[in-house]
Image: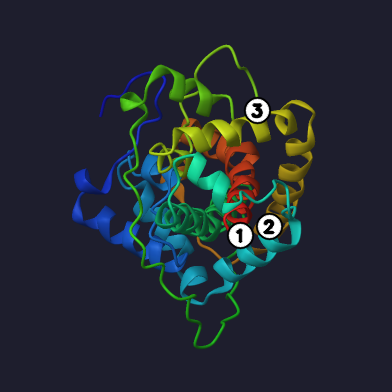
Amino acid sequence: MTASPDVLPELLELDAPASVKTIYARLRAGSASPIAALIWRHIATHPGVLEECWGALEPLFASGQLPETAWRIARETSPNQLLPQIEPRAQRLLGITEDNASTIGAVAEAYNRSNPVNLLGILTLLSRLSTDEPVMAAPSIAYWSPPPEITRSMPHMTPPTEMSADMRWLLNDLRFGDRSQLDAVVPSLYRHLTDWPAYLSVLHISLAPRFRDGTMADHTSRVERAMAAEAITLARQIRPTPKLADRPELQATMRRFTSGFIPTMIVVGRAIAEQFE
């Protein structure tokens, strides 16, 4: 698989073999979200690794232990009212109809379900790599059932290569690190919202100062620390993943996601949802 050097490789469901499509579906069901996240789509570009990772994590999904724990931690550590609500008149001036607002809210809810689960799942896999302890039996959560399905259709997820230069750089700036070059990671949440460029511009204006003054880093570090502590416990309950262990570059990418990208999107996703409540 080839990709532009400033775009992270991913295996889209349309192009995936049946085994990967099945795992994407189970990840969606396990996080009660219609989203198969970018980090899993990237892992799937490494033959056999997604299947191995899912085999290790599946019992924690089936019992509800991993998703319920992830959602609880996200609720307890993410800030409230990070951004002001956008009043209906302001929404209309931004080109957002009432139906659009419901769609944006549904997108935020989808990621507010999936991102905490993805973060805790990836941290658990990474934590397992650093321990040789035998697998412990996972405590079961009887009759676990996920929250009601999100029925609203998700907007098209724009590929980074199809974005205007202004949009690509705007979204690139909604992150930490070097602003002088494009990062290969473009969070999927933003990619679903490119039909509303005026809103993304307002989001950038509102969030950029919080990235610059360290406020966002404080919020995301709180989320990450709590998830990492829980992952140590969960890692004792999953089997080893030797194929993942043999791919240090993939591990490095996973650590990048867990050390900034996903915690940031947990905080941002909640802020977006509150703007449209």
Q: Amino acid at mark 2?
A: Ile
Labelled disc at residue 235: 1
Residue at left offset 27%, top offset 61%: 22
Measured as percent of width and height from the top left, residue 60 is found at 52, 69
Sequence-wise first label, 1 or 3: 3
Left or right: residue 175 compared with residue 199: right
Callouts 2 and 1 close, C-beta under 8 Å: yes
The residue at which mark 3 appears reads as: 176
For this rendering, which residue is in front, 88 or 167?
Answer: 88
> Residue 76 occupies which quadrant of the picture?
bottom right
Q: Amino acid at mark 1?
A: Ala
Callouts 3 and 2 close, C-beta under 8 Å: no
* Circle 2 SS class: helix
> Residue 44 occupies which quadrant of the picture?
top left
Q: How many marks?
A: 3
For this rendering, which residue is in front, 228 or 211?
Answer: 211
Q: Residues within 10 Å of mark 1 (few under 14, many from 20)?
A: many
The residue at which mark 2 appears reads as: 232
Q: Name the quadrant of the C terminus.
A: bottom right
Q: Which numbered mark, 1 or 3, is in the foreground of this view? A: 3
Residue at left offset 70%, top offset 48%: 84
Measured as percent of width and height from the top left, residue 36 is found at 38, 53
